[in-house]
Image (tube, rainbow, N blue to C red):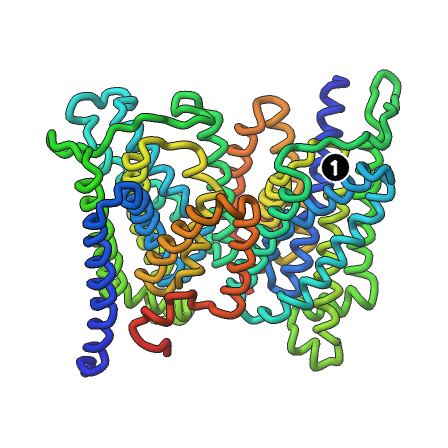
Amino acid sequence: MADLIIQLLNGLNYILILILVAMGLVIIFGLMKVINMAHGEFFLLGAYTVVLTDRLGLGFWVGLILAPIVVGLLGAVLELTLIRHLYKRFLDTILATWGVSIIIKQTIIIIFGPAGLMTQPPLPQLISFGSLEYPAYRLFIMAVSLSVIAVTFYVFYKTDLGLASRAVIANAPMASACGINTRRMYRITFTFGSALAGLAGATMAPLMSCDPQMGLGFFIPAFLAILVGGAGTLSGILAGGSVVGGSESFISAVYSPVTAQIVVFSIAIIIIRARPQGLLGGKGRG
Amino acid sequence: MDKTNSAPRISRSAAVFAVLFAALALTPLSGDLYLLTQLTQLLVYGIFAMSLSLIWGHVGILCFGQAIFFGLGGYIMALVTKGMVPGMTGWLASSCSGLILAIFVTVFFALALGYFLFYGRLSGPYLGIVTLAISVLMERIAVNWYYIGGYNGLTSVPALNFFGFELLDPNELYYFILASAAAMYLFCRGVVISPFGRVLAAIKNNEERAEYFGYNTAQYKIKVFAISAGVAAFSGALFATVAEFVSPTIVGFGLSTEALIWVALGGREVLLASFLGALTVRALEAFLSDILTYYWILILGLFLILCVTLFPQGLFGRLLADRPKS
């Protein structure tokens, strides 16, 4: 029983991180119609920021604060120098950001080497609930990601900025005609989406061995979560993230990670075939 | 009425084709065996690049996992010719049946996959990333499946052997691969200029419009996806015999990405430009990756960005294009 609860908590942990990564992707895609192939590498950069601060002796917490800032800034620079020239060229943005992802990954390999790196666990203690013991750090991750997800939803649905961004999503030229500075919205969006990936990477760094391929390992499930949940909606990724993340962590616990990936992927493909608009996307295309 | 327009068009690509393959056919005269074996492998990659150019450049399907089909073809070829497929011994384990099985199985796999993807209305970028995911998945399966060699793959794949005639001599092998490359080019070219290819061009131009004209675009895309997969499987099968090994990397993410870079740099909209792209990048890699080590991939990524933003037609695309794009 206790094992089961621990597994469930671990699964929830993974789901929340996945939603965090997927949310950045969806926000960027929703507003700018850009699929950021470097999103996984932004995650990677977040994780390696923590590795770096850990090595410099600054500790994990500085890294955690620094990661979203560094990655967000990088996103802003990228938007200014590259993405903004490619707004109307849909497939080309994929290739260009793909190039960016190659460069980031290779730079990490050059600086840190291709091997996996461990960092100091920031909160090593266990918290016990009766007979159950659970790592405090994992609870901390859940709290952080839950609050970031909640704040994002709040900003998106309750504030003026969110209203403006939903207007841009619905109809960018019309929003622009109504006086919304779409260029500025794009820049904010890309920065914020990147920062989310950076934060997710930083929080995951102490839990796993950081290697240059880890970004892809989160990018693909996050993307599947989006496809399963429906690309148009922010709430779709909650459903998609739960389906993909939940089944993946459950099956890898029972069988093996490879079986889990095969099963999850098959489920995703079947859902895509049966409901092209995603689980929660009601209106279909357009 | 098309005659005046189309006459120079055909002669242009035909001329490039003739010059390129004549030059390649003369290479063995140099007597440099190392060069020849290198070039044999490059030609195999060239065929692979053309398969990607066929669906990406001519239909607009961005496939991030083209190595799925290359690797599948390679593995099937290796398993068949090594006699590792249960029940297939004797003449059934020959190069011929290996090639046929590699192509057929891969084509059927692509048809099944295409059925799910294209009827699932996955458009450009989504499709790309889903194929990327499949590629990563296949690599992991190959690594974890011990019967097909696991992480190390399968080594000592037998050389090509047609009815007792074994292609062991590097010159013979080279000419066989060169002829295969020429045949594959003509085949892909045939697909592109056929009435079927016209519909594909229409889909690339504007899929909705093609649909309004009454074409079942999903069906067309599935078909060309399968054709391209067949060509990729053929090149993969050749690779298995030329390199004499297969390993999980040839089905995975790395090779898929590389193929994309070759085709993007060469020029995705022209088959021969993609072919040359593969040859050029691979040849440069052979020289430069020793000197530049990790920086080589970094530079490749940089080139990809530059090429995409500034020269979407690639290095050779404009040079070899039949006529200015309308």
| Residue A59 placement (x, y as % from top left) | 86, 37
Placement of the C terminus of chain A among the 4 image quadrants: bottom right
Asked whether residue B229 is in view, the answer is no
Q: Residue at x 74, y 17 (%)?
A: A1
Residue B160 place in picture, x, y as percent: 21, 34
Residue B54 sits in quarter: bottom left
Identify which residue is drawn at 48% across, 52% down.
Answer: B127
> Which residue is more in the foreground, A238 or A172?
A172
Query: Which amino acid, mark 1?
Result: Ala
Quarter-of-image position of residue A205: top right
Element marked by disc 1: helix
In this rendering, is residue A40 above or below B272? Answer: above
Residue at the image position 42 percent from the left and 68 percent from the top:
B313
Total marks shown come to: 1
Disc 1 crowd rating (10 Å Cα; few below 14, some 14-19, many 20+) is many
Q: Label 1: which residue?
A: A205
Residue B170 lies, in percent from the top left, at 22, 39
Asked whether B306 or B85 is in front, the reply is: B306
List x then y, in percent, for residue A221: 60, 42
Please tell me whether residue A175 is drawn above or below residue A229 in the rendered image: below
Q: In the image, is A53 to the left or to the right of B285?
A: right
Which residue, as the protein is rendered here, is positioned at the far front? B31
Q: Is residue B206 visible?
A: yes
Q: Which chain is home to disc 1? A: A
Q: Left or right of B155: which side holds A128?
A: right
The residue positioned 61% from the left and 56% from the top of the image is A36
| Residue B33: quadrant of the picture | top left
